[in-house]
Amino acid sequence: MKPKQPNIFPGVKSLFLCSLGFFFICFSGCRHANRDKIVQRATPHVPSNLHSVERFPGNFQRVVVLPCHYFPEDVLLLDYVDAVFRQELTKKRAFEPVFVSREELREMVGKTQLSPQGKLPENLLARLLTAHPGVDGVMFLEIFGYRAYKPLALGVRGKLVDLRSGDFIWALDETFDAGNASVIAAADEFQKREQVTTFSKHSHGSVLSSPRAFAKYVADAAFGTLPLR
C-alpha cells in the first residue's frame, strides 16, 4: 500500500475557505448597500396607466364590488386577494361597497368571476340592480402577472361603471413589480405608514417578503387613484 502523503500545507485549505466566505459576505453586503442607495434615490411609484374623473358625482354613493378575476382560477390565491382588496377598499371610504360573493355571482350568472376585459353576461347590470336595489355603480377587478417569489409582482385591472349612464368613472391597468426600485420605495413608504411588521432591514420588511402583505400595498396604491369625494 502506497503511504499517504503528508499535507505540507495544513492551513492553506482552511485559509482559502475562510477567505472565500469573507468574500461572499462582503459581496452580499456591498450588493445590499448599492441596492439601498438606488432605492433611496428612486421616486416612489405612483400608478399612471389609468382613467379617472376628478370627483365622484354627488349622488354616487353605493357600489357593487365583484370578486377579483384571475386566470387560471386559483382558489387559495383569490381567497386572500379578495379579503385584502376588500379591506383596503373599505379603508378608502370612497363609497359604500356592496361586496358580492363568488357563490352569489355563480347563482346570478353561472360564473364565479368576471374579467373587466371580457364580454359581460346578458342583462348583468339589470340583475345587479334587482339583487341590490339602490346601488349606483359596479366595480370589476382583475389580477394578473402574479409572482409569488422574490421579487414579488402583481398586476391589477379595475373598472368602475356608473349604472345610470353606463360611463366609466375609473379604470386602471397597472403592474407592481418589486424588482423595480420605485416600487420598493413606494412599498417601504406604505409599510412605514401602515406599520407592517418588519422581518429585517435588507428584506425591506414583510411588504416585499410576503405575497399577502405585498397585495395590501398593491390594493392601497390602486384604490388610492380613485376619484376624490
Image (cartoon, grey):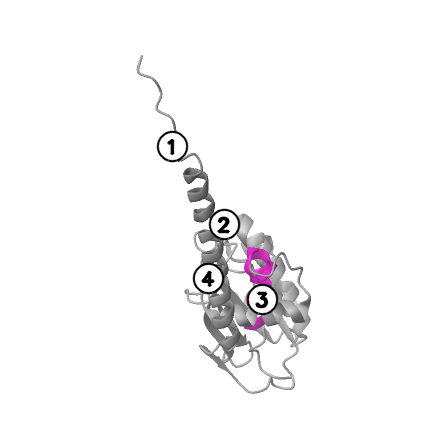
| Residue type at tag 3 | Tyr
Q: Which mark is residue 8?
A: 1
Which mark sits nearer the N-terminus, 1 or 4?
Answer: 1
Q: Which residue is mark 3?
A: 217
The stretch of residues the image draws in magenta is 204-222
Does dot 2 land on a helix, a strand or a loop?
Answer: loop
| Residue type at tag 1 | Ile
How many numbered circles does the render carry? Answer: 4
Front of the two marks 3 and 2: 3
**From the viewer's perspective, is residue 138 above or below residue 26?**
below
Which residue does the image show at 53% across and 52% down from the upper left? 77
Q: Which residue is mark 2?
A: 74
Does dot 1 land on a helix, a strand or a loop?
Answer: loop
Front of the two marks 1 and 4: 1
Left or right of 101: which side holds 11? left
**Residue 211 belongs to magenta span:** yes
Q: Residues within 10 Å of mark 3 (few under 14, many from 20)?
A: many
The span from disc 3 to disc 4 (Cα, nearest Å) is 25 Å
Percent of width and height locating residue 85: 60, 63
Which mark sits nearer the N-terminus, 3 or 2?
Answer: 2
| Location of the C terminus (image quadrant) | bottom right
Q: Which residue is mark 4?
A: 31
Which mark sits nearer the N-terminus, 1 or 3?
Answer: 1
Seen from the viewer's position, the closer of residues 170 and 10 is 10
Which mark sits nearer the N-terminus, 3 or 4?
Answer: 4
Q: Residues within 10 Å of mark 2 (few under 14, many from 20)?
A: few
The span from disc 1 to disc 4 (Cα, nearest Å) is 37 Å
Which residue does the image show at 42% across and 67% down from the upper left? 117
